[in-house]
Amino acid sequence: MKKLVAFDLDGTLAESKQPLQEAMQQALTDLLGVAHVAVISGGDWPQFEKQVASRLPEAADRSKLWLMPTTGTKLYTFNDGAWSAVFAELFDDATKAKILTEFDAALVATGFVPEQTWGERIEDRGSQITFSALGQQAPLDAKEHWDPDFAKRKIIQADLRKRLPGLSINMGGATSIDITREGVDKAYGIKKLRDASGIPLDEMMFIGDAIFPGGNDYPAKELGLDTVRVRDPKETVAVIEGIVACLK
Ligand SMILES: [Mg+2]
């Protein structure tokens, strides 16, 4: 019997950086009626608030919701009518500076220069540095067409892994690469969640769109969790409905 269902965010619960759609809001509300729900994603808290926390209907039981920005290096829970951080682990300044330098070097070395970008391409999220190939404000349409098969990012990822030994480098949403401390990936986040919630791993399951080697959801599978790989949020809604029917 599963007690907690954990989800990736972008490409799984919502389109990249978009708010939860109405069908998803309802599905999650129903799921919170029968299980704990966690969301673990590379995005930082403001993104979680915009896409998830502020979109939930009044009826949703927020006391069973565990929000884990920046790949689980931060945990937010809902207490006394407000969201607050339970913990947040941050990079030190020297590590941060090295990541930014090596990112530039990797892009030059791989010859990767997109024709157009929208906004900043590197985002410092405290415990995670995220590279968005087309920029933070790139339109969804451009992002979806840029690297649908992850081919471009695999090249950048391979180069970066050589330059930044000891750091964890994984492909995230539609165009992003996330860099975290060594050992920080969704498996790390899930173990932190197990410790904070007291719910054992075999009573959890994980649903994501990047459950394949190199994908940022894959560590959840390697950790031994039961996983469901989905194509898009529409498929996720159908999977949630099935789980709710089972757990009811
Ligand atoms: Mg995803």
Image (spheres, rainbow, N blue to C red):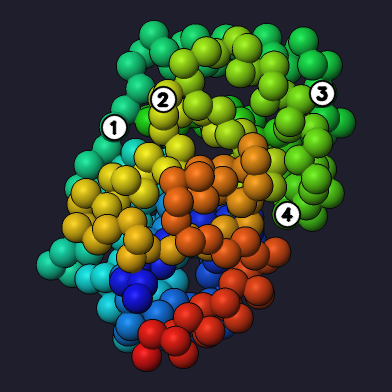
Q: Quadrant of residue 64?
A: bottom left
Residue under label 4: 140
Earlier residue among tags 3 and 4:
3
Residue under label 2: 181
Image label count: 4
Residue under label 1: 89
Q: Amino acid at mark 3?
A: Val
Q: Position of residue 78 (x, y in %)?
A: 22, 64
Q: Amino acid at mark 4?
A: Leu
**Distance between the Cα atoms at labels 1 and 4?**
30 Å
**Distance between the Cα atoms at labels 1 and 3?**
32 Å
User: Tags 1 and 2 in contact by the CB under 8 Å rule?
Assistant: yes
Kindly report which numbered mark, 2 or 3, lies closer to the viewer in this rendering.
2
**Distance between the Cα atoms at labels 3 and 4?**
19 Å
Earlier residue among tags 4 and 2:
4
Kindly report which numbered mark, 1 or 3, lies closer to the viewer in this rendering.
1
- Tell me if the residue at label 2 has its CB under 8 Å from ligand 1: no
Kindly report which numbered mark, 1 or 4, lies closer to the viewer in this rendering.
1
Residue under label 3: 113
Placement of 74 over or under 59, stated as above or below: above
Q: Please tell me whether mark 3 sits on a helix, a strand or a loop.
A: loop
Earlier residue among tags 2 and 3:
3
Placement of 59 over or under 166, stated as above or below: below
**Distance between the Cα atoms at labels 2 and 3?**
26 Å
Q: Position of residue 146 (x, y in %)?
A: 82, 43
Q: Nearer the viewer, residue 214 or 20?
A: 214
Placement of 205 over or under 126, stated as above or below: below
Left or right of 176? Residue 60 is: left
Earlier residue among tags 1 and 3:
1
